[in-house]
Image (cartoon, helix red, strand yellow):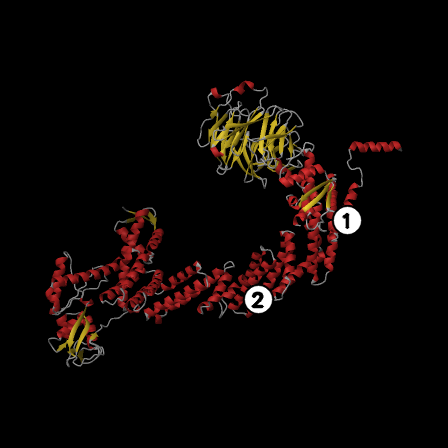
Amino acid sequence: MSNQKKRNFQIEAFKHRVVVDPKYADKTWQILERAIHQIYNQDASGLSFEELYRNAYNMVLHKFGEKLYNGFITTMTAHLKEKSKLIEAAQGGSFLEELNKKWNEHNKALEMIRDILMYMDRTYIESTKKTHVHPMGLNLWRDNVVHFTKIHTRLLNTLLDLVQRERTGEVIDRGLMRNVIKMFMNLGESVYQEDFEKPFLDASSEFYKVESQEFIESCDCGDYLKKAEKRLTEEIDRVGHYLDAKSEEKITSVVEKEMIANHMQRLVHMENSGLVNMLLNDKYEDLGRMYNLFRRVTNGLVTVRDVMTLHLREMGKQLVTDPERSKDPVEFVQRLLDERDKYDKIISTAFGNDKTFQNALNSSFEFFINLNARSPEFISLFVDDKLRKGLKGIADVDVEIILDKVMMLFRYLQEKDVFEKYYKQHLAKRLLSGKTVSDEAERSLIVKLKTECGYQFTSKLEGMFTDMKTSEDTMRGFYGSHPELSEGPTLIVQVLTTGSWPTQPAVPCNLPAEVSVLCEKFRSYYLGTHTGRRLSWQTNMGTADIKAMFGKGQKHELNVSTFQMCVLMLFNNSDRLSYKEIEQATEIPASDLKRCLQSLACVKGKNVLKKEPISKEIGEEDSFVVNDKFASKFYKVKIGTVVAQKETEPEKQETRQRVEEDRKPQIEAAIVRIMKSRKILDHNNIIAEVTKQLQPRFLANPTEIKKRIESLIERDFLERDNTDRKLYRYLA
Amino acid sequence: MGISKDRIKFNVGGRLFETTATTLANAGRDSFFGALFDDEWNLSPPSEDSIHFIDRNSDCFSVLLDLLRTGDLNVPANITERLLHREASFYGLLDHVRAAKWGPFDGNRLRLSDSVKGSAPGDGTAIRAGPDGGCCVAHGSVVHVYDWMLEEHSPINLDYQRVNDVGWIDSDNIVLSACERLGRGEGGMGLFSSSSGDLRYKFQVCHENQVKSYTAGALSFSPDYKIFSSCKGRSNEYGIGVWDQITGKQTDFFYESPGWSLGDADKLQWLNGKNCLLVATLFPRKDNCYISLLDFRDKNMVWSWSDIGSPMAIDEKRVRDAIAMEDSNSICVVNEFEDLGFIDLRMYGGSVRWSSRSKLMKSKMPDEPCYPKLALHEGQLFSSMNDSISVFCGPDWVLTSRLRRSYGGSICDFSIGGDRLFALHCEENVFDVWETPPPPII
């Protein structure tokens, strides 16, 4: 017996066992286990931290780390299982409160247990790469409480139910909600996402799917958008109150998808309240709301923009192709400007000045303005109207605004050269008749055109202004060198440079002797100061102020055209003249003479002549006498000439032809410029480049370009490639 | 009143101590004291006379309490390091002890703090300082790992494969490069745990989509988590391999060009500013020295130098180690007589400008020479020769300090890191630990 004992002892000594008491570990663990129980039962006041820490330390030191670690897990698991039963037993509304309470208790206990096991946490767990005490405590809570079958779905349903109730207007305990959700977040991002966020998003998606369907059946577009916006802010608020900030993006995208993206087309096209209706009725608020909501979803803005563009083009097309509207060019352009202002305002107030919308607006205008070939003419006429009379009494700033708007429309024009043609004609008329209201406004517009289209575009227009100025100087010089002329009729000559002004054939006529003497004097003065020039009289464009005395001694000053003056002067020597006699004496072309006589004899209130027989039209056999009974309450009487403001059909075609004619050299110049730098180019590329280069002035017609190329080949500027007929070669 | 409440009394192993809560707060929440005075445990309000009992060594407590009071560590001769560390570990104050033990590294203020004797005689291969004050010593097929307390952990044993180089990824992970074992497909490079010595990952070399066995040589790491190693494969996988530290995958390979040496390199050094890798293959591994800078972005050798074809007269000045100094745009080299030489990095094909310092050494060469090594740390250049390490400073690299210890023979390798310098001697594998003392009191 004793022998055996001795051997046993020897073996122990050889092993160098440190722990003398084999039950040491169990005993120590029991102390710690009891402490954990007490901590969980909130009965820790009698515990000595120092003792517990030392015991846990000793266990690790004596290589019982694993026992300690496993013991901690087992004990905590047992406690949590018990807790979860208590939570599960909680009825109705107290369920969440109980869970939250137990969760707080667990956190507190976990903290204390970690304190006791701090040494193990730092050494044993560190070196064995096991899970640290704190995260382990959270994992155990997750597995034994949150994922406990009888709690898991109930918890989720309770939370979702609360959210649902809040959505329907009930007030819920947000603080409790926040604490419970925070628990999910503390348990780790994946727990929050898997156990709450994902089901929450699914439920929300379902909720909004149903609700949006309900709304869309019962509301008009504006109301629907209001409701959607409200829901969106509610969800964002919800995230702020009790969800993880990262959920905001996800839940808003759910609302966006269900409430907006899925009903986008239907909303936009909703009858009587959709986008077109909002645009027509200037519903800025609704439009702004639509913009802000649709901006959140993919293709949302594209949808809005497309519908707006379509509507704009349709509306614009109707506007410009309506024959009624073409009757009044000023009104026509004013309508365009009004529409542009309207949509400008919509884009700036409701669509946040979105560039893409501005582009859509511009492209739409460009599209429909060019549908009407007379748009360039109308715009020029609008300007003409404004500059003749429309700008009277308007401040400079407002004038600028109107001109800027006109320039906006001008930018849309494809045939800018046609505009230039008309503009030149209208400007010439304004300048020669002295009708222009403000020189400053005229020049300002020229500057604008210059910045838009370059020097070339306005050089001739500017030349017209220069001519007017030099003419003034010339007249001063003329009368300065002929002081004897201060008596008798006054001649004012405007010397116009050929080429700068719209050319009109010079119509010859016999001027009265008094005038032709003066004219001769001026001619010799002018040619004396300027050598190598040629003067020809544009009598068809002149005016005259003549004094007349009628039968009963009534004196009037008549403002008439040069032709009319020639006719009236004849009556100084005779009382009655036949049409033939007048024609012979003046040599005015028949059509002009007829118009001239018509305005002298047939216009009521201005009939200084009497025609026999009395009728509206002028016949070759008619004869004329001075109307002795002529009366007017004004001293000065303006005798107008019957002139059509709008172009007549043949005139229009003539202008068109002139434009086409003018384009030819421009196209040729462009072709040569391009070929000079490229040397060799194929047909399609030439067409493309020429079109691109001429774009700022007009839209070149491909067939015309082709004709020009042919012409250049004939004149040996270009040649076709021998092998590839599509290639052109530049011949230097 | 407030002052007396702040007062705290301890009875440690029978000895009374009195301190303040403010002093103990220096220990931090994650310590014994942090927990002891946490609200949860402070259930009964401390009365004036309550004394906290701690069943620990009172001498050590006094040292540690002083550490909390002053931040200084003053260990009386009767307390061993091990005892102090044990007690600090109990209270959770090990980090405090380490921080107080030595100051920021300065090559001119170093003092010898410890010598650790290796377990077997013979040449050690390499010593590498870890980031937190520990080190590892490669010796044959074994790597001994020491923590900052110089406690040895389980060694890494490669089962008779020779270790060529070692490097620390972080305080917990060590990379080893080892010779290939013919026919076994082993060798190459592996990642090991510094605390347990276990293999965690094995890095592979792929050539034309086939995994090849290889011998890994010198190692280097870059701050963007890359590992570089010189590699010698069976066929033509000679060159520099690159791996990602995070994925462990091979990301690049720079193949050796004919007439140049990369796969045998003695030294790799990542140059962060230049985004290049310095590769040096030196005598006597090869008959000639090859130093080059590799740019991996466009697979280009952007700079190179070799002593091929140099006149025989300077043959005695063979380059034995090289180190790039980015700040001065040069490469410093050293020969077996501890002559420093400099090569300008800005010129292609420049020559070595030797600054001959000591011809005296020539006659005193020991029978078994250890070749000099170079290291650079924050503008200080270190060069080992025989049993001492010289420190050079300033733009002209003037010798400012010399570290020497008589025991252990020549220094075969040294390394700086974790604010410490470790020098490995070739006899008995003893290594010295040099530290900068904590800053002066005033």
The image position of residue B380, as x and y in percent, is: 52, 32
Q: Residues within 10 Å of mark 1 (few under 14, many from 20)?
A: few
The chain holding disc 1 is A
Looking at the picture, tell me which residue is in the foreground, B129 or A690.
B129
Residue A262 lies, with reference to residue B144, above or below; the image says below
Residue A502 % position (x, y): 24, 62
Secondary structure of the residue carrying numbered label 1: helix
The quadrant the C terminus of chain B occupies is top right
Task: Please indicate whether residue A475 sits to the left or right of residue A30 in the image.
Answer: left
Residue at screen point 67% across, 61% down: A158
How far separated are the C-alphas under marks 2 and 1? 60 Å
> Is residue A685 visible in this depiction of the protein?
yes
Res B176 → quadrant: top right
Q: Give the residue at mark 2.
A: A213
Report the chain holding disc 2: A
Amino acid residing under circle 2: Gln
Residue A527, given in percent of the width and then of the height, sits at 13, 59
User: Residue B334 appears at what percent x and percent y?
Assistant: 52, 26
Residue pointed to by mark 1: A34
Quarter holding residue A461: bottom left
Tell if the residue under mark 2 belongs to the same chain as the one under mark 1.
Answer: yes
* Displayed quadrant of residue B89: top right
Q: Residue at x 25, y 59 (%)?
A: A462
Q: Residues within 10 Å of mark 2 (few under 14, many from 20)?
A: some
Specify whether A86 is left or right of A694: right
Q: Nearer the viewer, residue A302 or A704?
A: A302
Relative to B419, is A612 above or below?
A: below
Give the amino acid at mark 1: Arg
